[in-house]
Amino acid sequence: MPLELKETRLPGVGVKWTMTPSAGSRITVIQHNDGDREVYIHRRGSDEEPAAVLELHDDEARQLGALLGGAYERPKIVEELEMAARQHGIADLADVTAAVLEEDGSISIIPIDAHTHPSTDKRSAT
């Protein structure tokens, strides 16, 4: 599920983004006009004081973003999902409504339009 991302312009400073992950914490990122970033991590969304603060230069922030975005290594489950989708005749994961990792290690795929892609049987992707 996508995170709700709130953007606030900070005149003379830059832009602030705030998001609340499903675990209930809160993350605030301030991107300064000079490219530096401040990342505030709050254990709970209601906490006033952050549990951690990161100060990053532009190049450090971009490298962290690439790391978090999977640029260095894709999670194995993504590769397995893509393989299972291809086995069901689905070329793009954007065409998948849901995927279920079964107890036996197989992945069941539910396409966005079951009439277009009627195959929802289990096939092992491991």
Image (tube, rainbow, N blue to C red):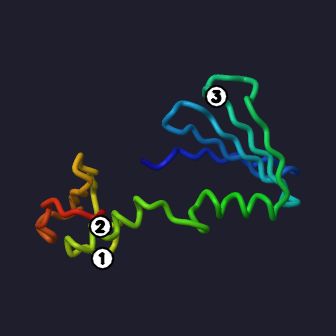
Q: Are marks 2 and 1 in contact (CB under 8 Å)?
A: yes
Labels 3 and 2: the sequence-earlier one = 3
Would residue 7 appear left or right of 31 to someone viewing this image?
A: left
Amino acid tagged 1: Ala
Would residue 15 appear left or right of 26 to someone viewing this image?
A: right
The percent position of residue 94, horizontal first and vertical second, equals 35, 66
Q: Which residue is mark 3?
A: 43
| Circle 1 SS class | loop
Amino acid tagged 3: Arg
Q: Looking at the picture, tell me which residue is in the foreground, 115 or 87.
A: 87
Residue drawn at point x = 20 percent, y = 70 percent: 88
- Badge 3 crowding class, 10 Å Cα cut-off, few under 14, some 14 to 19, many 20 or more, is some
The percent position of residue 40, horizontal first and vertical second, equals 74, 38
| Circle 3 SS class | loop
Q: CA distance from mark 3 to mark 1?
A: 39 Å
Above or below, 70 relative to 49: below
Q: Which residue is mark 1?
A: 91
